[in-house]
Every structure is written in structure tokens, then in C-alpha cells.
Image: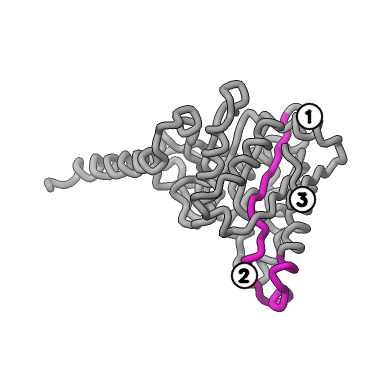
Amino acid sequence: MKADQKTIVYIPDGEERGAAMRRITHLCIAAHQDDIEFMAFGPIAECFGKQDKWFGGVVVTDGAGSPRSGLYADYTDEDMKAIRIVEQKKAAFVGEYGVQILLGVPSSQAKDRQDKEIAQRLADILREARPRYVYTHNLADKHDTHIGVATKVIAALRLLKEDERPEKVFGCEVWRDLDWMPDSEKVYLDCSGHPNIGRCLSAVFDSQIVGGKRYDLAAEGRRLANATFSESHACDTYTGLNYAMDLTPLMLDKDLKIADYVAGFIQRFEQEVRHTLAKFTEE
């Protein structure tokens, strides 16, 4: 990965950087501090305490635009950037991440469709780490910065040579869940393990929660709801569950248009609803 003065590389257990990067098997690339913990707790839990599986996180933006109230009401943008770095490092330590990288770019750059720098920096990280699995935001998310980052992740993956690519790429739930997707196309991320760690990871982001946005409760509630409502005719298989969409085809086929690919999920959902209704109506 090329050196950049804005990039922070935090390695909780103090391992040498090259070794720390090479051990990463599951890598999540997110827009904001706290997005990783809300959308990718499944792979975090899968890697927790393991020596053959290591989780890594990348946060793209600097956190300057965060809403603030209460204790943080008078914080400047620079203050918020600093506190959100501290919070993300806390999460990486609690979750025993192999590495946590913060790129520190403005949200406006992440949303700039003409920007090429972010994709290049992400491609450098992917080449260095060589993870088996990559997680990012789903492409039907309703947060513009999330979509900006997700599309840059796709651009970065398309810069890789075949032998540099991960095995699978997943788009996860944050600002829009994926319950609407046909069950046969959902990727199930099991969040059942280490629920105590999951609560801690969400709760360390005090600057976001203290103002009244209970992301910690909402994230846990979504996992529980998904686990219960994922199957209507059987007992619960999971105690916590997040959904993801498979984005791997967008990495493998550079000519596949992102909008067309996501629209395909929506069209198949419409077809499923129409098929079900046709069994009960004469319309």
C-alpha cells in the first residue's frame, strides 16, 4: 500500500505491519466509523479469537460531517474527526481486528464519481492484504456516501489482476436492510456468536449514540429480527443474522453495469411478489 499522510494504520496486537496485513482473511471496507461494526459483525464474530482467520477494517471518510449534540455539541469538525478515530480504534481493539485502516478522506470526495484516488488506494490495500472475502455497503443502500464508497470498492476490485482478487465480495445492510431480497439470493451472515462483543462494538461509538441515535440498539434489533423472520415455518436457526447481496459478479465482469445488476434483484423481487399474489387473486 502506498504511503499517504492521511492514512492511519492501527494494529491492536502490535504485529509488524506486513505480517498483520497478510494474515487478513475477511476485510470490510466502509464509509464511516461504526459502519463496519453494524454491517459486518458476522465476519468479526467468525474471526474473533481465531489464529487462522483474521478480520480487517477500512474506513474511507474522516467523520467530519457527523451530527453532534450533548457532550459533543460544541465539537468542531476537527474535534469530531479526532474522536471518531479514537472510537474506531476502540472497536478494533475490542473486536481483536488484525488491522484497522482509516483513509481520512472527505465525504465529498467519496461521493465524487470522477475521483480515482480512493479506488487506487483501496486497490493497494487489497493487493497487500489479499483477503479471501470482502464486505462493503450494499448497492441498494439509501446513504449517498455509502453508495459512493461501495462503487469505489467495485472500481478497486476491477483494477486487480485475477490472482489478486478475493474469492467473494458482499454488500451488507446499514442504511437499508435487505429483507426484501428473494430468500434464494440472500447471503446469510451469522451473527449468533459472541453477542456480548457485538454489543460492545456498537456501544463504543458514543459520539453517535449520545445525541439520541440508538444505533447500538437498532443494529442488535435488526440482527434479532432477521434471525426470527428469516424462516416462517421452522424454529430459529440463528440468534443474530445480517443479510448481504453477492457482489462478486461485478468484480469478475468489468462490463457488467452496476445499476443493471442491482435492478435485477429488484425485478426478481417484483416477480416473486406477483407470483405469490397470482395464487390468490384473479387480477
Q: Is residue 65 magenta?
A: yes
Give neighbour class at mark 3: few <14, some 14-19, many 20+ (Cα, 10 Å). few
Q: Nearer the viewer, mark 3 or mark 2?
A: 3
Name the kind of residue labelled 1 in the image.
Answer: Gln
Name the kind of residue labelled 2 in the image.
Answer: Pro
Name the kind of residue labelled 3 in the image.
Answer: Gln
User: Label for residue 154?
Assistant: none
> Which of pointers 1 and 2 lies earlier in the amino acid sequence?
1
Res 56 seen here: yes
Residue 226 vertical placement versus 123 (above, below)? below
> Is residue 93 found left or right of 218 in the rendered image?
right
At x 44%, y 40%, the residue is 231
Secondary structure under tag 2 reads loop
> Is residue 278 found left or right of 133 in the rendered image?
left
Give the residue at mark 3. 5
Residue 197 vertical placement versus 190 (above, below)? below
Give the residue at mark 2. 67
- Residue 269 position, x and y percent, is 33, 42
Q: Nearer the viewer, mark 3 or mark 1?
A: 3
Q: Is residue 207 magenta?
A: no
Give the residue at mark 1. 51
